[in-house]
Image (cartoon, helix red, strand yellow):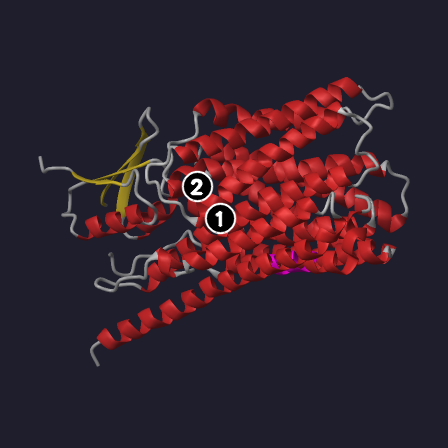
Amino acid sequence: MAEERTVDGRGLMPPEPMELTLTALDSLPDGEELLLLLYVEPHPLYGILRKNGYTYRSQTRPDGTVEIRIKKA
Amino acid sequence: MQPGLSFEQAPPISVPFRFFLTAPVFGMAAGLLLLWQGPAALASRWTGVALALTHLIAVGFMLQAMCGALLQMLPVAAGANIWQPQRVTHLTHAGLTVGTLLLLAGFLSEQALFFRIAVPFMAVSLGAFALIVLVALFRTPAKGPTILALRIAVFGLIVTITLGATLASGFGWQLALPLTELTHVHAVWGLGGWSLLLVAGVAYLVVPMFQLTPPYPMWLTRIFSVMLFFLLAAWSITWLPLQRPAELQVALASAAALLAVVFAAVTLRLQGQRRRKVTEPTLLFWRLAMTCLILAAAGVILQQLKPGEGEDYAGTPFLLGVLLMVGVFMPVISGMLYKIMPFLNWLHLQKVGKPGLVVPNMRQMIPEPRMMVQLKLHLAALALLLGAVPLPFLVYPGGLALIASCAWLEWNVVEAARNYARFKEELAEKLAAEQPD
């Protein structure tokens, strides 16, 4: 299994997490997953992902961190 | 950066910007009215001038900016889509702008005709806005304390609009209504049930996000909005019987004020724990607002414990009004505009981007030193207007400082809008230059 790619956006000032995520998606090979960690649900990013053929799953950890796993549809 | 990414959820940038460009103009108008009327503006909270001033700030400035921000924030931050966003924008913006002017004319001229036009006009436009936003908030799959607080806040707005329309009908058609009681309840829902809950709902999201603080504690976000709502509802009901339960009224109002103190204190504490110790204008605007909220809430409690006093004396309501409107809500709104507008610029500029084309940084949208100048002007306005209670002549420099603060805010807002247009053009030119013939 390929190594998981992660963008940890916690503690970064918006829009840095989105910039890093979009840059990381540029080089994400088909079938691989990008893990994004944030303290909020990134609704603008979800819109972009849906429109551009990505799927995502999100779940919230007990400490309030939202894990978003993104890959090409 | 991904080429040609679409940003379906963000409504056109003109949607929120027209509200943000209009709001400071009404703030300046309030300053002008203070200069025109001088110390007479402080004579009583029941004069037409005092009511005109209140509505210039509460509807013209506050509600204008809040509606614009909400229309933008719902899709971006809550994943809630507004039905017919363009039409709702036109209707709401017209309702707020023309509505404020009608109220201003009505209060200053005391002509019933203005209220007769304002009632259907504002009730339909603002009522439609509130209902459409409420539906969007109930249809979004998003959950959490922000959504809950926003739902209750919009319900509070509906209560405020209904009571406002009732009061204005009373002026317009000379109806025999208990005007004093209705005015108290209308004002408390407008400032507490709508404005404060909206600020809290937004704070849960943006304070940790933009100020890099720990999240709000769950015990607070779970109880604050629901408890404030029930306290205000119970307090409102105590006005109904002829024999008013005075002690219960005092207890409920004081409990609601205490709750506001808790929210403000937690916010200040979180800001003290922020991970990057950078002091920037938005943070300072928020800290000023939370400090004033504590002072205003303390004032409300003191006023409750000394019944009778302050009923006719204009100083107390003027002091509380200045603390809440000029001290709490105007600073929060200014601080938020300095985050929202650069962020929206950045978000919308992404649409024109392509690989290798770097979209300008958020910091380039409004120069930070200019935000700081507005903060200082606003602090001066606040201090002078509070000082006008013991020293009424201070209302003149206070009014001038308020005009200066709002004019400076307008300049900064215009700068953000102009920079958006400029950067968009520059990006388009760069793109065109890269296209092969």
Which residue lies at the image location 47% right of the left edge and 44% below the top edge?
Answer: B284
Distance from disc 2 to disc 1, alpha carbons, whole Å, reads 9 Å
Secondary structure under the numbered disc 1 in the rendered image? helix
Residue B384 pos. (x, y %): 65, 49
Please say if B55 is above or below A6. below
Q: Main secondary structure of the magenta part?
A: helix
Magenta span: B23-30
> In screen coordinates, is B386 left or right of B65?
right
Count residues near mark 1 (Cα–Cα under 10 Å), then give few for <14, some for 14-19, many for 20+: many
Task: Tell me the amino acid under the disc marked 2.
Answer: Val
- Residue under circle 1? B336
Contact (Cβ within 8 Å) of mark 2 with mark 1: yes
Of B36 and B160, nearer the camera is B36
Task: Tell me the amino acid under the disc marked 1.
Answer: Met
User: Do marks 2 and 1 share a chain?
Assistant: yes
Magenta stretch: includes residue B24 = yes
> In screen coordinates, is B165 left or right of B373?
right
Please say if B332 is above or below B2. above
Mark earlier in primary sequence (2, 1): 2
- Residue under circle 2? B206
Of B396 and B31, nearer the camera is B396
Magenta stretch: includes residue B255 = no
Q: Quick one: quadrant of the C terminus of chain B?
A: bottom left
Please say if B317 is above or below B34. above
Which residue lies at the image location 62% right of the left edge and 38% below the top edge?
Answer: B194
Is residue A60 in view from this perspective? yes
Residue B394 pos. (x, y %): 71, 52
